[in-house]
Image: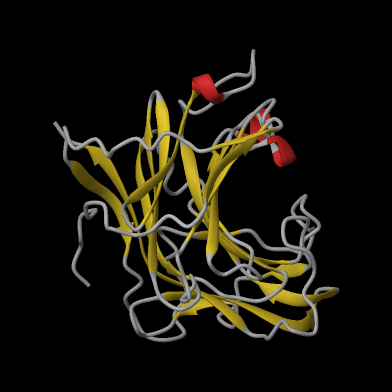
């Protein structure tokens, strides 16, 4: 697969854009993409290789277990090829399955670049096709590399894409830190005009992270911009240190609820690529 630089904004219709947090919801100010400095690719994974091959161990490691990850998730995350492997078509598949494993009724996978690739600032981008169904919760996100010493949410969290499988037209971008985490996070939803949803085709999800602001995009459309001015009074801006990448498909949890009789398994998130850019001179 050839490396493609970020494309300019595409003419998608914004069916729903709402900025929420701290008891307020408002239409955000759309910040145009800054084209004053070109992006330069500094890290990527194109997921080329034979079907069944595990992700590149020089780039990815795993979170394994069935602890619920603080969100009451129902799956046991593994590193088995049944849950995470190349599909032979240029994609990585993270597959959620209904099966008994490790004391849980579902399995899935959660991969990360922790201690392998961690970066401050840049453009983080992935081209994804998402699963659908009640109780499915795929995500593409960044977590502060100092989580082991500072804990969460002091380390900071940038959710580039998270999504409820039961609402396949709508995705969400969120920011978590001290005083603005969990249900009090800063977040915005963005919806496709339909009828096709994020489960019908691939879409590009990205965040542009500069020292003074973060900007969320879907398919080149900027739909949320957050600066320190958006934080609650006295809350610190904790986005000036290295973060690492996480990709996962959760089953259940407070964000989406549990699967029900309508949820079909297995369900896959397909990842065409993940790319990270820095601003050039």
In the rendered image, residue 144, in percent from the top left (x then y), is placed at 55, 37
Q: How is the image coloured?
A: secondary structure
- Find residue 208 and report its image quarter: top left
For this rendering, which residue is in front, 88 or 114? 88
For this rendering, which residue is in front, 208 or 275? 208
Residue 111 in sight here: no
| Horizontal arrangement in the rendering, residue 97 relative to residue 58 (left or right) | right
x 71%, y 32%: residue:
23
- Most extreme residue toward the left is 281
The N terminus is located in which quarter? bottom left
Residue 118 in sight here: yes
x 41%, y 86%: residue:
51
In the rendered image, residue 143, in percent from the top left (x then y), is placed at 56, 42
- Find residue 265 and report its image quarter: bottom right
In the rendered image, residue 134, in percent from the top left (x then y), is placed at 71, 73
| Horizontal arrangement in the rendering, residue 171 relative to residue 279 (left or right) | right
- Most extreme residue toward the top is 234
Compared with 27, 189 (above or below) is: below
Compared with 106, 177 (above or below) is: above
x 48%, y 70%: residue:
198
């Amino acid at each position: 697969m050839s490396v493609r630089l970020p494309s300019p904004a595409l003419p998608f219709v914004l069916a729903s854009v709402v900025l929420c947090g701290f008891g307020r919801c408002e239409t955000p100010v759309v910040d145009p993409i800054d084209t004053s400095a070109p992006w330069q690719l500094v890290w990527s994974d194109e997921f080329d290789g034979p079907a069944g091959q595990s992700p590149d161990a020089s780039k990815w490691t795993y979170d394994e277990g069935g602890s619920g990850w603080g969100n009451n998730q129902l799956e046991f995350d593994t590193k088995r090829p049944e849950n995470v492997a190349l599909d032979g078509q240029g994609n990585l598949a993270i597959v959620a399955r209904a099966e008994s494993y490790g004391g849980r009724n579902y399995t899935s996978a959660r991969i990360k670049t922790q201690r392998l690739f961690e970066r401050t600032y840049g453009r983080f981008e992935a081209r994804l096709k998402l699963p659908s169904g009640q109780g499915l919760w795929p995500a593409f996100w960044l977590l502060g590399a100092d989580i082991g010493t500072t804990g969460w949410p002091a380390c900071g969290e940038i959710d580039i894409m998270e999504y409820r499988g039961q609402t396949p037209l709508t995705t969400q971008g969120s920011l978590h830190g001290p005083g603005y985490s969990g249900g009090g996070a800063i977040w915005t939803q963005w919806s496709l005009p339909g009828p096709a949803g994020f489960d019908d085709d691939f879409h590009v999800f990205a965040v542009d992270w500069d020292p003074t602001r973060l900007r969320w995009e879907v398919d080149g459309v900027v739909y949320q911009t957050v600066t320190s001015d958006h934080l609650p009074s006295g809350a610190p801006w904790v986005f000036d240190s290295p973060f690492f990448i996480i990709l996962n498909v959760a089953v259940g949890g407070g964000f989406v609820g549990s699967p029900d009789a309508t949820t079909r398994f297995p369900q896959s998130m397909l990842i065409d690529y993940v790319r990270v850019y820095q601003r050039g001179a």
